[in-house]
Image (spheres, rainbow, N blue to C red):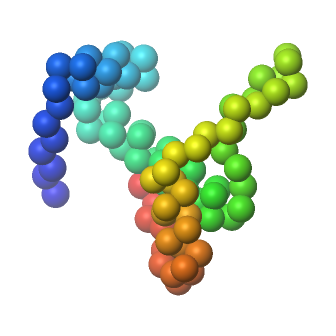
Amino acid sequence: MKIQLDFDAKGKEILDCLLKKTDSKTYKDLFNCSLTLLDWAIKQRVEGRHLASVDENNQTYRELLMPAIEAAAQRHCEEPNENLAAV
């Protein structure tokens, strides 16, 4: 499948920065990595886990609240036979 996406200058700047930070060779590699992370995050929420960044030095955490992840997890709860795709 081929998908075309249009980004403004700021969006392209963010993509290029992420490409360098992740050592991704192509935008396809970057998007595959992003989809893998999103798929994992949804699976965690479906299992009732919270997503967070932990600061072990200060013993604090910051929870990730992302409407798309919450919506996908809620939808899965309403339709439990739906399989989440592995990327």
Relative to the observer, which residue lies in front, 44 or 59? Answer: 59
Give the quadrant of the C terminus.
Answer: bottom left
State left or right for residue 47 relative to residue 77.
right
Note whether 68 is above or below 85 in the view shown: above
Horizontal side of 3 relative to 43 (left or right) equals left
Image x and y of residue 45, in percent: 63, 58
Q: Is residue 21 visible?
A: yes
Q: Quadrant of the N terminus?
A: bottom left
Residue 22: quadrant of the picture: top left
| Residue 53 at x, y percent in the picture | 69, 32
Looking at the image, residue 44 lies above or below residue 21: below
Q: Residue at left 34%, top 16%?
A: 17
Q: Is residue 23 at least partly visible in the picture?
A: no
Residue 20 x %, y %: 36, 16
Question: On the image, which quarter does residue 8 sit in?
Answer: top left
Count of numbered labels shown in the rendering: 0
Above or below for 7 versus 71:
above
Residue at (58% x, 44% y) in the render: 65
Instruction: Please give the name of the residue rendered at 64% of the width and 56% of the height, measured from the top-left corner.
Output: 44
Judge left or right: residue 14 versus residue 36: left
- Percent x, y of residue 72: 49, 63
